């Protein structure tokens, strides 16, 4: 209890009083020997006994979290350090070897020009305590009100008629109402109609003798902020009858903000947390975990029910992991599938957990997280499938390159070698013509000329196959027209039609080569696989915000193909890679038995 008498100067060093000098921040600058003795006798730490450099204000603030008297001391100390109060005193009980004893704490500002305060603790003798008790008996309300008014939480008392009998100063901060005007008012007048309607079920319950606890959002008096509060209603029961109820409303906004930030982080990472009691088999999970598992409050939150959600093919693996974790006091780390009760979806989860053990070393519970890794798992499998496909296509490409080289070597050998051999034979005949027979010379010359011409034709044909000379000119239509015309002569059973604007100019050589190779690949695939009767080739241009675009369409009425099936060749992938390298798009539309349509759009650059 606080005394209202003016204390003596706390700066005088005495044998009975323990004194600490604080700076303006509440950090201890120095202490006397009595302070050290008092701290040791009270079981304080060696650091606090030495005092210097200790943040005394922070220590009191930590104690004020769950101690009403410490909260009152904190308020008084802050007021003196801020210069809003000239002194402060508080009496409190403390432990002693002979039993409980009472002490007094007094705080005074340091003499000018120094800034800070002096804190004095001293034990009260029986006479002082008796005088205090008499004084308190005569005036109980002011001392209690001072303590309650120092608290940041709203403290109030309401009778059975819901009329206020006491309201501390915090009501001014929360509702903007002068606490002196609240006694006698109905609770509806203080908290408002809407909040009264929301709180009515809790009010009815506490008047029936049942303590209540709930959360509520309360706007600030100016409406600019929103406080999250934890409210407690405690019934006042006398001789079995409820006389009214006490109200305590605590600001939990920082805690709520931390919870919301944690919940948002869990949503972003698709991560839930849990605590599982090993003895009862019950578990508690975060809202995100319940969303991941697809369960609600109506579902049984037990490890057995959880195991029933685990995919049958993974269940034994999970059970073995849990048993090994408990046996070895290790970490649970396992990926497994579940079948969600809510929608029957199969989801991949990654579970992590650590054990908490009792003093005897026996595991009591497991605390951990569960992350939904379904999308990641699918991405990893898709990536692996692409890597496997790329490996297969690379091998296929190498094989094709080797085949093309073999074909080229064979043609060089079959076509060029015989002509070169003939040239050498005729040249040898010329050397052996000692009589210089004109007719023999003429025949040899004609034969050499014929072989040279044949070599030229073979070389030209090979070079046209490797790189058509028509692609060196901007007119892409002529190159494509020649290509499909030659193809049509080789496949007279297939009817073809081409729409190729003769005045269409394609300045980019890489674009011309890409379109030519795509048409070449399409025609090759149609001849080998499609069993088509008709082919349509369309080339045109159009304008967009990005500039001129070229549009190529190749369509056939053949057997089509399954788009989801793996293709043996690398033709489609090669075409797509060519188009993407130019910043274009390629679309393939096909169904089994309904033909195929390939559409390419590339910038005309």
Image (cartoon, rainbow, N blue to C red):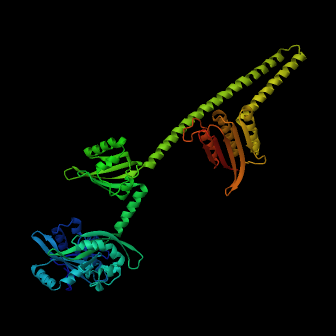
Residue 158 seen in render: yes
From the image, which quarter does the N terminus lie in?
bottom left
Asked if residue 481 lies left or right of residue 354, the reply is right
Between residue 510 and residue 36, name the one nearer to us.
510
Asked if residue 562 lies left or right of residue 136, the reply is right
Residue 172, horizontal then vertical, whole percent: 33, 81
Between residue 394 and residue 293, name the one nearer to us.
293
Residue 538, horizontal then vertical, whole percent: 71, 45
Between residue 469 and residue 224, name the one nearer to us.
224
Residue at 73% from the left image edge and 22% from the top image edge: 417
Residue that lies at the very extreme toward the right in this rendered image? 438
Residue 115 seen in render: no
Residue that lies at the very extreme toward the top in this rendered image? 435
Residue 77: image quadrant is bottom left
Residue 52: image quadrant is bottom left
Residue at 23% from the left image edge and 74% from the top image edge: 207
Residue 122: image quadrant is bottom left
Residue 578, horizontal then vertical, whole percent: 63, 44
Residue at 21% from the left image edge and 72% from the top image edge: 209
Between residue 223 and residue 368, name the one nearer to us.
223
Residue 411, horizontal then vertical, whole percent: 70, 26
């Amino acid at each position: 209890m606080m005394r209202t008498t003016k204390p003596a100067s706390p700066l005088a060093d005495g044998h009975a009083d323990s004194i600490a000098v604080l700076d303006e921040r509440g950090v201890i600058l120095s202490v006397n020997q009595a302070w050290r003795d008092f701290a040791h006798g009270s079981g304080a730490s060696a650091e606090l006994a030495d005092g210097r450099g200790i943040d005394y204000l922070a220590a009191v603030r930590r104690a004020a979290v769950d101690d009403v008297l410490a909260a009152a001391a904190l308020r008084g100390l802050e007021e003196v350090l801020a210069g809003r109060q000239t002194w402060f005193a508080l009496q409190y009980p403390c432990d002693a070897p002979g039993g409980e004893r009472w002490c007094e704490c007094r705080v005074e500002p340091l003499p000018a020009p120094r800034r800070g305060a002096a804190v004095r603790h001293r034990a009260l003798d029986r006479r002082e305590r008796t005088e205090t008790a008499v004084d308190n008996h005569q005036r109980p309300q002011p001392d209690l009100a001072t303590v309650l008014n120092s608290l940041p939480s709203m403290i109030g008392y309401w009778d059975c008629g819901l009329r206020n009998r006491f309201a501390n100063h915090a009501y001014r901060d929360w509702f903007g109402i002068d606490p002196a005007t609240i006694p006698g008012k109905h609770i509806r007048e203080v908290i408002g109609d809407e909040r009264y309607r929301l709180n009515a079920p809790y009010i009815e319950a506490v008047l029936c003798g049942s303590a209540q606890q709930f959360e509520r959002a309360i706007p600030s008096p100016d409406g600019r902020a929103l406080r999250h509060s934890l409210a407690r209603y405690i019934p006042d029961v006398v001789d079995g009858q409820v006389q009214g109820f006490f109200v305590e409303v605590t600001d939990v906004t920082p805690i709520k903000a931390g919870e919301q930030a944690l919940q948002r982080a869990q949503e972003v990472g698709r991560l839930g947390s849990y605590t599982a009691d090993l003895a009862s088999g019950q578990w508690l999970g975060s809202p995100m975990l319940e969303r991941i598992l697809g369960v609600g409050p109506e579902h049984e939150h037990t490890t057995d029910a959880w195991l029933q959600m685990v995919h049958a093919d993974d269940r034994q693996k999970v059970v073995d992991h849990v048993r090994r974790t408990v046996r070895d006091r290790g970490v649970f780390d396992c990926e497994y599938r579940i079948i969600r009760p809510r929608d029957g979806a199969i989801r991949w989860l990654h579970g992590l957990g650590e054990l908490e053990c009792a003093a005897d070393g026996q595991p009591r519970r497991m605390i951990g997280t569960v992350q939904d890794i379904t999308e990641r798992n699918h991405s990893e499998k898709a990536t692996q499938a692409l890597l496997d496909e790329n490996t297969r296509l690379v091998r296929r490409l190498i094989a094709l390159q080797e085949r093309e080289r073999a074909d080229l070597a064979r043609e060089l050998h079959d076509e060029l070698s015989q002509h070169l051999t003939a040239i050498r034979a005729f040249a040898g005949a010329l050397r052996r013509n000692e009589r210089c027979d004109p007719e023999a010379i003429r025949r040899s010359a004609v034969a050499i000329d014929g072989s040279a011409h044949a070599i030229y034709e073979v070389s030209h044909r090979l070079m046209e196959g490797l790189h058509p000379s028509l692609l060196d000119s901007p007119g892409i239509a002529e190159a494509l027209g020649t290509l499909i015309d030659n193809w049509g002569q080789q496949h007279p059973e297939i009817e073809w039609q081409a729409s190729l604007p003769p005045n269409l100019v394609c300045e980019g050589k890489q674009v011309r080569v890409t379109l030519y190779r795509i048409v070449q690949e399409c025609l090759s695939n149609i001849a080998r696989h499609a069993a088509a009767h008709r082919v349509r080739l369309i080339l045109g241009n159009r304008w967009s915000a990005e500039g001129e675009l070229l549009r190529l369409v190749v369509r056939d009425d053949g057997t089509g193909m399954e788009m989801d099936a793996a293709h043996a060749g690398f033709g489609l992938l090669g075409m797509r890679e060519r188009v993407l390298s130019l910043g274009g798009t390629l679309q393939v539309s096909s169904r089994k038995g309904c033909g195929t349509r390939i559409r390419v759009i590339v910038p005309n650059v």
